Amino acid sequence: MIGAMTEDSGQSGGRAGVRRPGDSIFRALTTGSGLAIVIAIGLIGIFLLIKAVPSLVADKANFLFSPDFITTDPTNLKFGIRDLFVVTVLSSLVALVIAMPIALGIALFLTHYAPARLSRPFAYIVDLLAAVPSIVFGLWGAQVLGPTLEPFETWLNKVFGWFPLFANGNIPLAGAGTIFTVGVVLAVMLLPIITSVTREVFRQTPVMQIEGALALGATKWEMLRTTVLPFGRSGYIAASMLGLGRALGETVAVLIILHASPKPSGFSLFDGGYTFASKIASAASEFSQPLPTGAYIAAGLVLFVLTFIVNAAARSVAGGKVHK
Amino acid sequence: MKMKRHGAALGIVAAGALLLTACGSDNNTQSGGSTGGSTTTAAGAKPDCGGKKSLKSSGSTAQANAMSRFVSKYNAECDGYNLDYTGNGSGAGINEFLAKQTDFAGSDSALSASKGEVDKAKTRCDGNPAWNLPTVFGPIAITYNIPGVSELALDGPTLAKIFSGQITNWNDAAIKKLNPSASLPDLKIAVVYRSDESGTTDNFQQYLTAAGGGAWTKGAGKVFAGGVGSGGSKNDGVATILKQTSGGIAYVEWSFALNSKLATASIATTEGGTPVKVSAETVGKAIDAAKFKNESGNDLALDLSSIHGSKVAGAYPIVLATYEVVCSKYSDADTGKAVKAFLTVAINDGQTGLDANGYVPLPSKLKDKLSAAVKAIS
Amino acid sequence: MTTTESTLDRPASPPAFQPVSGARKTKNLVATVLVGLAFLVAVVPLVWLLITVVAKGFTALLSADWWTHSLKGVLPEEFTGGVYHAIIGTLLQTLVCALIAVPVGVLAAIYLVEYGRGRLARTTTFMVDILSGVPSIVAALFVFALWIGTFGLGQSAFAVSLSLVLLMLPVVVRSTEEMLRLVPQELREASYALGVPKWKTIVKIVLPTALSGVVTGVMLAMARVMGETAPVLVLVGYSKSINFNIFDGNMTSLPLLIYTELTNPLPAGQLRVWGAALTLIILIMLFNLVATVVSRFSAIKTK
């Protein structure tokens, strides 16, 4: 990275003895700002924990394994995150499975297939997807896409029903307010995120390698397979993990699309239910008493830990290649 | 040079923002005011405008649309006076009222003595009791989606069995008995319920408890307890799912049934009799026969089971009653005067046109009682 | 082909790529088609979405009141009034958020690029990455726990801005960092050689050079937080009238208006939902566009 070269060249040498108050003040300011970010993350964890603990203590169900989430009676809280966890992870994974290959294709298209002059406008078109607010995705998913996907999901359920993921869900398939539909919508929302990072990494492929491969008589695809893809793999995976983090936390779109179910999740893609985020948002207008609110904050804390892990993993995969 | 360019860009943005700021307006009365003005003379009771210029209230979302009607009438009849109503949920509404952040609360349920709300409200009102005034009634429609069936009659026990999963097919004998002439298909019943906490669900389950003839054992509460079907978020989510679900049945606020063009079922009361459709008249009958928790006095908290279990012929019993929770006497006389003026408008001229938004105008007997209570506020 | 040639004429290893065979050509073609298809797949939902939003919402935008009036006093079934209050709310909340996030973000980026070494710098970069993955609902809950739960303050637009700061910070830090690293090292050295202190060099030389990129990053970050719905659901109340006070009272933003009007089943409500959605998309696109223009016309000359 270029950063390695910029290390304090100004302070080395004979000026070390000169005291400049401006310098130390400015240095303190910038360091403080960096520190503020570290502290902010710490505060998020601490405050969520503080507010969650009383409710966790009052919880009459098993927090990790109970499918219930009943908070109407503050003296009899029964909440667990089993179903929230299952639905959150399943829908995000569906989104990732769909979005990853497509995003890879788009990134390759934009960097190596699209005519140079059109590459930028095309990139802008994909980025436009990121400009569409998630609430609009939700409306579209519930009113337009869901009914369109219903016959397809019915077919999947009929033909592959023996496979647990495609087994009968805990809600009727009508309208397709299922984890599967949510996954498809989330996939569309992830496309610009995964694409934009992957695109940048692919652009950094050393030209020498590309030209070398072509000079050896490789077809375009072989060139991509032997130079660009290996070079960009870690960046691509990291970008996908970032996308996963975003999918885990998506709120309003999921809330509008996914149908609720009175039965616990059966690990099917045709289940309904709530994700962590949509459960919290659905109760946002009821945050008036500390104990029930704490139950939702506890769910938020788990979501925070989950995204923390995913993002930390993305970072370790990426090394220094991704900055977005 | 570069700095200048940025300066120019920022300048344009700032100028744009200023322009936007300068031309905005809260004034929409040209259209809203004219309708308000014409009805002023028609109704009898004139409000005694005065007191605090700007009132604050918050709470139940179920009455938010009625409130905006009341406010626009209040604006029209009491020039220069306003009320801000925030639909943030009954719980929040009560809490903000108790914390003196608002002047009165809108709530789907009366203050509860067991939760200590009655005592807290008394403290908030500086020793004077708070009153529950039921001013807005929203019927809950039973809507269904059965291809080819345009008329459907149901009663309490049948509904209780459907929503708890004991009746699972539309050609069930119990439904056939209520609909001798309809050709009911062999179709699975898909229950659609409201998944967020709501007064609608609470009142519907209270109805099932009162009128279900023992078939509903799951109790009441803001969360649907039937254990079957699939849930949608808020009324719009429920309506969307129902439209997509063949064989579906759901309970939604009347306005959603009307505007989403959903088929609504007729309901027979516990006494049997002819099943009736939801309408201002049939619901009004049920409300007028309602009993109060305290038959004397101005605290008009309703005994809801008397509505839900209504034995009146031709009454439609599934209703969501929402209250304004007010202090009987405000320590600040200005606030009291303004609250009184607002509620006077609300229960008189405010009632016109309410049915367009899916509410039922106050029937005359209740209106008299309310007028007396409002007059006693100071 | 092998036996007659001397070892000298033979390549040291066989060529990496054989002459283009039919199979390889087909593979190449298939790859090309798949890649092209992938792009089309991305365009389909976008076009589908935009057409849906435009078709259902554009009539709302045609009235002058839409841009200049609030919804105060407008009855649920009336087609009058506008979303001026929500546009103001969206811009105010975003702007206040930027006022906090930009200085902190830029300073943190300067720290990372110009000063940062050792464990704190490593921790900071790590935490910026973590922060960029914090879901908006978690940021909202945190501010709720802190602002409303602990300090006992009421819901306000400022609380929303605070939670947006958490979402905006990482974007500002990252983009500023990138731009600062692009500033040629020679510029810094020339400045030091003239005896200019380090802080002055950064403020007067490095930052102005990178400014356009920083501005672009900020605009993009603002565009990102504008469409956030989760924080406004938790942290502020809905109001139908104009409110300029971010510390007190309810303030509507476009996402909140959409979410609230969803509960209005009348045709007027549906039109407001889609109209506000279209307005929000236009607003976000404008910010994106300005960002693109700024970066296009004033990119750092790296050579």
Image (cartoon, rainbow, N blue to C red):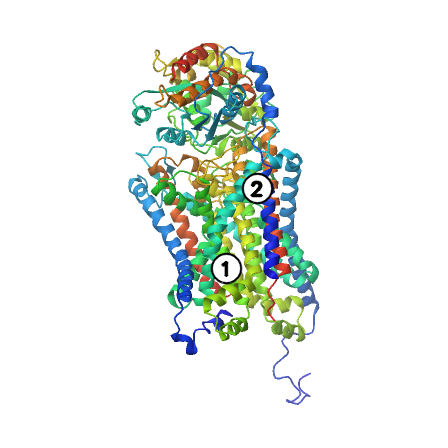
SS assignment at label 1: helix
Dot 1 crowding, Cα within 10 Å, few <14, some 14–19, many 20+: many
Q: Is residue B59 visible?
A: no
**Residue position marked by numbered label 1 in the rendering:** C174
> Which one is in front, A291 or B86?
B86
> Which one is in front, A274 or B129?
B129
Residue B321 drawn at (x, y percent): 44, 21
Q: Residue at x 42, y 63 (%)?
A: A26
Residue A102 drawn at (x, y percent): 59, 55
Disc 2 from disc 1: Cα separation: 28 Å
Between circles 2 and 1, the one closer to the viewer is 1
**Residue position marked by numbered label 2 in the rendering:** A136
Q: Is residue B251 left or right of residue C23?
A: left
- Give the total number of marks visible in the rendering: 2
Three-letter code, disc 1: Arg
* Image quarter hosting the N terminus of chain C: bottom right
Residue B107 sits in quarter: top left
Q: Residue at x 37, y 25 (%)?
A: B217
SS assignment at label 2: helix
Residue C186 sits in quarter: bottom right
Q: Give me the chain letter of mark 2.
A: A
The tag on residue A218 is none
> Which one is in front, B158 or B264?
B264
Q: Give me the chain letter of mark 1.
A: C
Dot 2 crowding, Cα within 10 Å, few <14, some 14–19, many 20+: many
- Above or below residue A209? Residue A101 is above
Residue A5 drawn at (x, y percent): 49, 73
